[in-house]
Image (cartoon, rainbow, N blue to C red):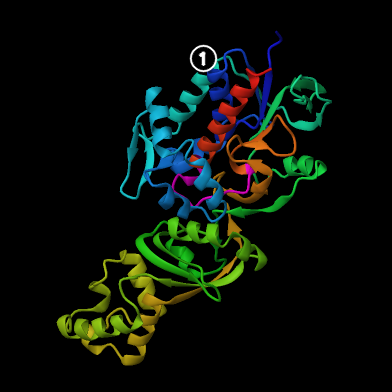
Amino acid sequence: MNKKHLVVIGGGAAGFFCAINAARMSPGLEVTIVEKSNKLLSKVKVSGGGRCNVTHACFSIAEMIKKYPRGAAFLKKIFHHFFTTDTIAWFKERGVELKTEADGRMFPVTNTSQTIIDCLIKEANRYGVKILMNAEVKQWIVDEPQHANNQPAFTIKISGDRILQADFICIASGGYPKMSQFEWLKDEAYEIEEPVPSLFTFNMPGNVITSLMGISVENAAVKIMGSKLAEQGPLLITHWGMSGPAILKLSAWGARELQARNYTFKILVNWIPEFNENTLREKMQQLRFDLAAQKIINRNPFALPGRLWEYLLQQSEVAADLRWSDLPAIKQNKLIKNLCAQEFDVKGKTTFKEEFVTAGGIQLDAIDFNTMQSKKIPGLFFAGEVINVDGITGGFNFQNAWTTGWIAAKAISMYSKSF
């Protein structure tokens, strides 16, 4: 009997997970990964500042799906097949222990993404997965059915005038800005949700706040004016504007709305979200009494970074030598406003390194959630970011990659043994 052949398009997390699990589950299956670039697992490499945020320590599907702006209903179904507990166990069985940080993010105990990369490549080598680099897919064709069960086969044309024959294809080629895979699928009358960037930082060109680059605040509240979009969490000031989990979560939930605004909008930042303007006004009266003789610049009562406190005083026109007891009402009101509702103009976005994520992709109603197989073309499977699912920052997008890759692998393994 001829060996059946699976071709996985894309050498990222989802592609590797599909390939190595399919090869492991079905030893008679030939598996090839084709990657258009000269890099494998590039997002794994840079994720979590080079530590790889493998998944999130959330063990309730109902809670987990709340972290996905798009695709939650689909994930509710597929997480029953392979969830966070399965991810942790899968890596542990291969000698990779994960640790949980205070915010729930999970990393390898080695604190380096190379541990995850080495694990995945070792598995690929162990099960004989062939990897073709610099192999851009130019075209793939659905051939006439060749098997007794009416299963079609595929011809795949890749760069260098090479041709691959496949019984199964898994498209795991990621999302924006790699648009070409969507063009192939449009040719097959697939409905594609327009891909737009998610998980990006906010640019504030020319704003003096950028002079504080490198300063982070453990907990800030950020609201996009003229919308219901609001998030709270760590905020990082960069040389181009603002980043950090609070900003990245906002960009995920607002991916489409912010694109519609051409990434030009206003935000309000509350640097001390335990207060609002009314409660802070009451607190100020107490501070004026308790710290009366002390200079405001020397006594920061809100535990903000020193340079940020100085900046906020300057923005509120509070003189460096002013004492708490002498703070004029008009300047106190400015300081309260800047602490609880400072306004910033955002003009543009930045996707940091390769950690961007795509909102959009293959419409989920075209995919069988039990197998990740196309409902239109038997033998065609999808995994990872190419489908219309995306999560906020924190390991959620990788969990989608592991889950969809594993489900596709299991189904392909089963089908490969049936004919």
Q: Which residue is mark 1?
A: 126
Q: Position of residue 67 (x, y in %)?
A: 47, 53
Which residue occupies 60% across, 34% down?
A: 371
Of 99 and 170, the residue lying toward us:
170
Any part of residue 323 in sight? no
Which residue of the protein is positioned furthest toward the top in this rendering? 1
Residue neighbourhood size for the residue with mark 1, other residues' Cα within 10 Å, grouped as few (<14), some (14–19), many (≥20): few
Q: Position of residue 172 (x, y in %)?
A: 63, 35
**Residue 418 horizontal side relative to residue 57, left or right:** right
Q: What secondary structure do most residues of the magenta stretch adopt?
A: loop
Q: How many marks?
A: 1
Which residue of the protein is positioned furthest toward the bottom in this rendering? 329
| Above or below: residue 115 compared with residue 400 | above
**Residue 372 horizontal side relative to residue 220, left or right:** right
Which residue occupies 16% across, 83% down?
A: 293
| Above or below: residue 187 compared with residue 206 | above
Dot 1 falls on a residue whose secondary structure is helix
| Above or below: residue 305 compared with residue 12 | below
The boundaries of the magenta stretch are 386-398
| Above or below: residue 3 compared with residue 396 | above
